[in-house]
Amino acid sequence: MITLDPGNISDYISDSEVEESLPGAIRALDSLVNRKGRGSEMLGWLDLPSVPAESTGRLEEEGERVREECDCLVVTGIGGSYLGARAAIEALCEEAEFPVYFAGNNLSSLYHSRLLHKLQDRRFAVCVISKSGTTTETAIAFRLLKELIREQDDPRSSERIIAITDPRKGALRKLAEEIGITVFDIPRDVGGRFSILSPVGLLPCAVAGIPVEEMLEGAADALEEYTRKADSNIMLLYALTRHLLQAKGIAVEVLSTFQPEMNQFCEWWKQLAGESEGKEGGGLFPASTVMTTDLHSLGQLLQEGRRNILETFLISNKPCRELIVPEEEENLDNLNYLAGKSLGQINRKAYEGTRDAHISGKIPVLSLEIPSITPRAMGELFIFFELAVSVSGRMAGINPFDQPGVEEYKKRMFRLLEKPGV
Amino acid sequence: MITLDPGNISDYISDSEVEESLPGAIRALDSLVNRKGRGSEMLGWLDLPSVPAESTGRLEEEGERVREECDCLVVTGIGGSYLGARAAIEALCEEAEFPVYFAGNNLSSLYHSRLLHKLQDRRFAVCVISKSGTTTETAIAFRLLKELIREQDDPRSSERIIAITDPRKGALRKLAEEIGITVFDIPRDVGGRFSILSPVGLLPCAVAGIPVEEMLEGAADALEEYTRKADSNIMLLYALTRHLLQAKGIAVEVLSTFQPEMNQFCEWWKQLAGESEGKEGGGLFPASTVMTTDLHSLGQLLQEGRRNILETFLISNKPCRELIVPEEEENLDNLNYLAGKSLGQINRKAYEGTRDAHISGKIPVLSLEIPSITPRAMGELFIFFELAVSVSGRMAGINPFDQPGVEEYKKRMFRLLEKPGV
């Protein structure tokens, strides 16, 4: 399971402050578990870890079919309709095994023409993900991909499209009924950023070869562990720390990983935190760093800049072929003291050195650690953070499950594009 | 040239405030031009755009040689020793043309073993970049790459290594002298984050096929334009805006692009801004978004979250084969109103809609726009931002050209790794 190292948090939040606000955190958690409070109609994500085995089986079968019949997968979706899958796939999969590409998450010609070029001569599958089926970015990319499939003149082309959409209505549901493509449901009570453990996240993962059953098991265990009310509940401690530090002037939370393959997980987290809490004039600005890369970029500011940052280290390891620093007789670079050591060992010391440096630089730091990056652990992390932002959001008195502000740019864009009826 | 759209800045900074602080901005600029003030020993970057033609010629010849003799390039460096080159190459080059990889910018076994695997059977060139030659991350990756070259048993292996390092001393200089590899100088009065227009950035660009002469021409024009003291100097207006907004409680500056290929440019900018200004308890936290992707992630928070953000749009276009939205008879997705329109046109409207939405959401926004992403324009942007952070850093009274805080994690890491003499 995840462990929490509270770092120097006690320098910023006293024991009595924790004690005083713990009941509030527990109340927030209770309201979630009992499906009450603002936004409680969107709490279906709490049921996802215990999805029946036959549903998982169907996902895994479909995954296997696609792997057998196609060369690669194009996940077509934006925001919550791709970030979770991408996070899990980058963390867990080897690029070479079964390539997964992402389309429809921007409006760039260059991006999409490069992708279409790559797909030209391949039997690619498309997993199109959109509740309504009319999300602009996704629908545009889907049209382009369908056009390419038509050009490829494949008699079994409809077998290459999988739709994940609303259980009853919308453009994709209609298309599925008309041309008979495979379709999976997005539960109506699950918002995009909480959908990784629904078919939205699980189907792409299954195609990529991730044992989704294990991911769900990890999530189920985490759900049990982190909905306990004991004061050793580290999810509550993390949620409460974020909440209290905000009141003390912290403006930015930086999620720092030392594993580049966790970069996309940080992107998933940024949506989760930013979209859940960035409303009614509140919310921490979520940022992320990949170390040690960014120690040579944002390191100076983290060490000595404005003290308005909470740094949350997300520490993990990934079992892989370890590289060993070679010995060199000449030792011009003075590196022989590391010869025979693995990069993993050195990276670990870099983390410890960084944590200590940032503590001495007087920014609040805490660490969340998993023993290794596995499907189980990813499931745990997804639930851990989903619960944590829900609790701190509830403590702040906002609805963590809506996103009214996202419509604003769309409204104006539609008007500028002269969309009929807008 | 770059144009500045001041957006809604006048809602946050009055004309009289601009007038009052303009003399300070001009003084800061003067101090740079006259090579005075804190950190003036590190102002060599102001000379880089006017580097003599024979130097550029040597870079371009070397670039051509590497392209002819090798399959790909591995740029080995961290921080300022790779971010600028990577920014230019991602913005300007086609992946397929001549692959450029990056090593030594982290301590990940997984990252480096994947890279080494990819290089196994290829005649790769290594461009190793480090002033001292003993930067831990870079030196480790360089040892691993040298080991692979030895295993490949290439009689002309030394021709595959190019060092960019201190003009007189250090491990790489020594190595170059001993085994006779090609070597280029890092000017002693240029810091890492200001080194893109030195061989540090230009050599990798030349290998990648970018006409570096054009990039330097753009930089030279920008240097002339933005060191003029007129109050129409948009660099001064941008620098001054950042400075004044900080005093008014703005904590985060978000650089927002609508072109995914500019993502690495934003990473270059984050180091430039964060490392130059994040000191003595000050500095804006630099973050970036790639739109429309992040409108479905950070969009909610930008629209309705805490009002402590300055958003700087970096608007550009890239001449490329434009994709056109296809017509579909059924029009299930209601997208036919866009049929025949190019993605570029739609993306532009997305930007305009977003800017208007964020203005209505009451965050200060301004836009910097270049007509298209060319080598010239990239040169302009590099100088524009280098000057701007130097001016706003000088206005804040700090030394924008040092980075004392970066040593802190290293010291502690070395101690934990039991480095001799530490």
Image: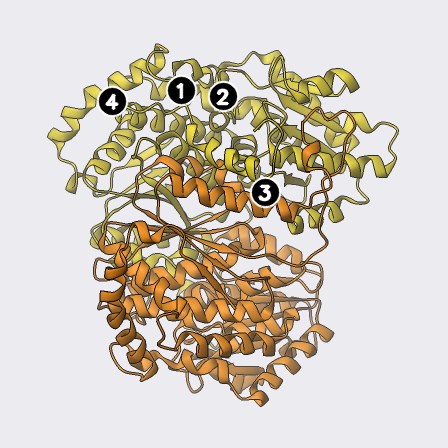
Chain colours: A yellow, B orange
Q: Earlier in the sequence, mark 2 or mark 1?
A: 2
Q: Is residue B208 left or right of residue B178?
A: right
Dot 4: chain letter: A
Q: Report x, y in % for residue B6.
A: 40, 56
Under tag 4, what secondary structure? helix
Task: Read off the residue under disc 4.
Answer: A25
Instruction: Nearest to the eye among marks 2 and 1: give it.
Output: 1
Under tag 2, what secondary structure? helix
**Pointers 4 and 1 within a single chain:** yes
Under tag 1, what secondary structure? helix
Report the amino acid beneath label 2. Answer: Glu
Q: Earlier in the sequence, mark 3 or mark 4?
A: 4
Residue at x 79% of width, y 39% of height: A148
Work out how far the residue at label 4 is from the one at label 2, CA to CA, in angstroms.
26 Å
Task: Read off the residue under disc 1.
Answer: A223
Circle 1 packing at 10 Å, graded few (<14), some (14-19), many (20+), is many
Task: Read off the residue under disc 3.
Answer: A106
Q: Earlier in the sequence, mark 1 or mark 3?
A: 3
- Compared with residue A135, is residue B293 higher up or lower down, i.e. above or below? below
Dot 1: chain letter: A
Along the line of sight, the residue nearer the viewer: A206 or B107: A206
Work out how far the residue at label 4 is from the one at label 1, CA to CA, in angstroms.
16 Å
Q: Earlier in the sequence, mark 4 or mark 1?
A: 4
Residue at x 45% of width, y 76% of height: B225
Under tag 3, what secondary structure? loop
Q: Report x, y in % for residue B67.
A: 70, 73
Q: Earlier in the sequence, mark 2 or mark 3?
A: 3
Question: Can you see residue A335?
Answer: no
Report the amino acid beneath label 4. Answer: Ala
Q: Is residue A244 left or right of residue A328?
A: left
Residue at x 21% of width, y 54% of height: A360
Q: Which mark is residue A217?
A: 2
